[in-house]
Amino acid sequence: MISTWNKVRVGNRLYNLEIKNGYFSAITPYQHEQHLTGSPSVSTHDADGLLYIPAMKDMHCHLDKHFLNEPKWYSRQTIDTLPNQLRREKELLGQLTQSVEERARVMLDTMLQLGTTQIRTHVDVDQEVGVESLEAVLKVREEYRGIVDIEIVAFPQQGLIRSQALPLMREAMQMGADLVGAVDPGGLDEAIDPCLEEVFGLAAEYQAGVDIHLHDPGHLGVYTIERMTEFTAQAGLKDRVAVSHAWGLGHISDVELSRLADKLREQGVAVISSVPIDRPMPNLPLLRSLGVVTMIGTDNVLDAWSPYGNGDMLQRTSRLAERYHWVEDEQLLGAFEYAAVGAVEPKLGERADFMLVNNVINVEHALCKVPEREWVVSHGQIAGGTRAGIRHKRALSR
Ligand SMILES: [Zn+2]
C-alpha cells in the first residue's frame, strides 16, 4: 500500500512524503502535487502546509479502569492509605456501565485522536475479576493490531503476595500478557524478596518482561529498586525490566541517584514516570544523562485515583518540559525523546507515525502550545485527528 502526503511542513520547508507499507519511502521537497495513479491501493492527501510532529508512545496507562464516556460523575475521596484506596477503587469500578472491552476501545480511540500510536497498558488481575479484564484487552488488542502497538502488563493491583494472585498471574502469562507486574513489594505486599521472587520467577518462566508500580518512598523504594536490578541480573532479563513511578528516587540526593543509576544502566532497567506535579519524582534528565532508559506515560485518566488526565501524551510531554523549566530550543526538542515514537522529523525507512498540526511555528512551539491534532497517521494510515472524520471521533463525546 502506497500513500503520499503533499505539502507537509517540516521545520520551515514543505515536503511531499511517500509512505509504502507503513514506512517512509520517499521524502522530497515540495514543488507540486504528486498524484500516484495506477493502483486502487494508492492514496493522495493534501497536508495543506500543516506542521509535522512525531506520534507519541504512552508507556504507562490502564485501558481497563478509566471512566471516559461514563454517563455520571463518580465522586472520589482523598487517598489516605493504599489498601483503603484499593477498596474504594473496587467500589467505583463495580458501578461503571461500560464493559472492559468497551472501555479499552474508548481509551484507544481517545489516544489515537491525540496522536498516541504505541502504548503499554497494565491490566488488573485479581481474585474478583480473575483474568476477565485481560481477556477483554487481549481481544481489543487484536482489533487495533496495525493501528496501535499494545504491550500488556498483567497487573496484580491488589498486591501479588497480599492477594495471593500468583496462580492467576500464571494464567495471565499463559494467555498472552507480555510483562509481569506488581505493586509496592514493600509497602503493599510487605514482602520485598518473596514478591520479587514470584515476579522474576514468572518472567523467566514465560520469557516475559517486568514492570513494577513502585510508590514506596525514600530508601524503601531505593532498596526495592536495588533488589530489582539484582533479580534482573539473576534472571537474565537485562533490558526487559522497568520500574514505574519510582517516587523514592525523587527523595534522594543526586549523588545517591547517580550511584543507583549505574546499576540501572548496567541491567537496562528503565524508569517510567507519569510526571506528577504534586510530589517529588525521579530526576529523569539526570538519569537519562547517565544512560538510564527513561520514559513517560499518562497513567490516570479520569479514574478512581484522579479526575484529572486526558490521555494526551503531547500535553504530558509538555508538562515534563515545564516541570524541568526547559525553555531553550534544544531542551524543548529533547523532550520528545521521552515520548515520541520516532524522530522529530520524518526519516527515510522509518515508520510513518506522525501528527499534523496547525497554528504553531515549529515543533518547539507545538510542545509548548499543545495544539489540536488535525491529522494522526499510524503505520502510514490515517488513524485520527479533527480532520479525519466522524469515524474516528466516536470516543470523544465526554
Ligand atoms: Zn499505573
Image (cartoon, helix red, strand yellow):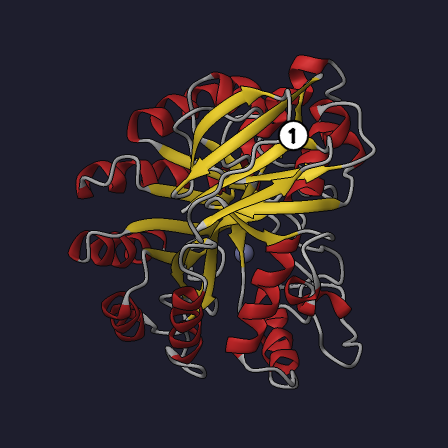
- Quarter, ligand 1: bottom right
Q: At x 73% / y 41%, what residue is drawn?
A: 277
| The image quarter in which residue 130 lies | bottom left
Taking the image as shown, residue 129 lies to the left or right of residue 377, namely left
Residue 142: x percent and y percent?
A: 38, 66
Considering depth in this image, is 208 or 144 the residue closer to the camera?
Answer: 144
The residue carrying pointer 1 sits among few (fewer than 14), some (14 to 19) or many (20 or more) residues within 10 Å by Cα, namely many
Considering depth in this image, is 356 or 127 the residue closer to the camera?
Answer: 356
Q: Is residue 35 above or below residue 300?
A: above
Q: Is residue 217 visible?
A: no
Q: Give the SS element for disc 1.
A: strand
Residue furthest out toward the right: 359
Q: At x 56% / y 77%, what residue is drawn?
A: 102
Q: Is residue 334 above or below residue 238?
A: above
Q: Is residue 313 visible?
A: yes
Residue 209: x percent and y percent?
A: 30, 49
Q: At x 68% / y 33%, what residue is drawn?
A: 320
Q: At x 57% / y 51%, what residue is drawn?
A: 382
| The image quarter in which residue 365 lies | top right
Q: Is residue 148 above or below residue 70?
A: above
Considering depth in this image, is 273 or 374 the residue closer to the camera?
Answer: 374
Q: Is residue 169 above or below residue 146?
A: below
Taking the image as shown, residue 100 lies to the left or right of residue 192, namely right
Residue furthest out toward the front: 38
Residue 129: x percent and y percent?
A: 44, 82
* Circle 1 residue: 8
Give amino acid for label 1. Val
